[in-house]
Image (cartoon, coloured by chain):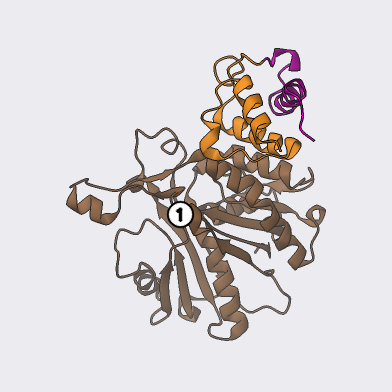
Chain colours: A orange, B brown
Amino acid sequence: MSASEQEILEGLAEIINEETGLDPAEVAAEKSFTDDLDIDSLSMMTIVVNAEERFGVRIPDDEVKNLTTVGDAVKFIQSQQG
Amino acid sequence: MAGITADQIDCIVMATVSHPFQTPACAPLLATRLGATGAAAFDISAACAGYCHGIALAADMVRGGSARYVLVVGVERLTDFTDKTDRSTAFIFGDGAGAAVIGPSETPGIGPTVWGSDGAQWDVISQRESWIDVHERDLGWPHIVMQGQTVFRWAVWGMAPVAKRALELAGVTVDQLDAFIPHQANVRIIDAMVKQLKIPDTVAIARDIAYTGNTSAASIPLAAERMLREGEIPSGSLALQIGFGAGLAYAAQVVVLP
């Protein structure tokens, strides 16, 4: 079953919290992973793998660099869900 | 430390990717300099997995009877192959050497090796310029580069099943280990592997990367030696060692440390 945008956002906020300790309330669609949330490339990969497992999608390495904001990730995950 | 003399060595396996001669191999020269005169001697190219490949070969040679004592060396001078302006490699690559003697034993000291490769990811860690490029474009010297995020994903989530399989084949559970000695690629990979494998606090984790850097084929023996020398673990400890790197190639085995 596909998750809604809001569910994906909340899921990502939990995953980000687990990896970085960042308050889930800080994680909003317009926030940039690097500039706003201070997430480095390896933490980003951990978040990607955990998101893949949670939402049952595949996020190729080449795609990761295109995910600038949390909203980009939400949209990509939603587009990959069946 | 092995209690043998150089002339008792039947074979030298040298794991390296930074020996600057295409041929001859480095190992025959070492054999002669050591006094292991006439020993079989050859190099293997399995990058950061080279030492564990060497241990696998040596263990099988001793078991198979083609050698009684095998010297396995992991050695690199990555400085020569490092692009000093590449911030994804320049601050972690280092130089070093480590070695172990594999010989006959009444009790098994080296568990079954789990190894393999993935040529579909051949370019993920590689020498950026081929020797042909270096020659034709007058580049001076080639450099080793890597795609950090892809390596991180493969090393942490791709290698966890390999490590688990090596434990399973050795009949050892993770809580029975004394030490976990992964290739010293970077601390983030080591920490993530520990988390992924659910390695308990009772197991000592090799973190020689903090002192020696990423020395490719030399990193596992260097890390093991530091743990033994500093008394973090005693001789006879049970360790899971796993090498992974360019190829992509990997090898893991449970060993009893000397």
Left or right for B63, reference B233: left
Disc 1: which residue: B122
Q: Residues within 10 Å of mark 1 (few under 14, many from 20)?
A: few
Q: Identify which residue, B144 or B74, lies in the foreground.
A: B144
Question: On screen, B27 above or below B179?
Answer: below
Q: Residue at x 59, y 77 (%)?
A: B60
Q: Identify which residue, B136 or A70, lies in the foreground.
A: A70
Kind of residue at badge 1: Trp
Q: Identify which residue, B222 or B153, lies in the foreground.
A: B153
- Residue B249 is at least partly visible in this image: yes
Question: On screen, B186 above or below B253?
Answer: above
Decide whether the magenta segment is chiefly helix, strand or loop.
Answer: helix
Residue B153 % position (x, y): 60, 43
Location of the N terminus of chain B by quadrant is bottom right
Location of the C terminus of chain B by quadrant is bottom right
Q: Residue at x 74, y 67 (%)?
A: B169
Q: Per the image, is B129 magenta?
A: no
Q: Residue at x 34, y 46 (%)?
A: B143
What's the chain of the residue with tag 1? B
Residue A35 % position (x, y): 54, 16
Image quadrant assignment for residue A51:
top right
Image quadrant assignment for residue B4:
bottom right
Image quadrant assignment for residue B82:
top left
Q: Residue at x 48, y 64 (%)?
A: B73
Question: On screen, B119 above or below A75?
Answer: below
Q: Identify which residue, A30 or B169, lies in the foreground.
A: A30
Region rendered in magenta: A1-28
- Residue B237 is at least partly visible in this image: no
Residue B179 % position (x, y): 71, 52
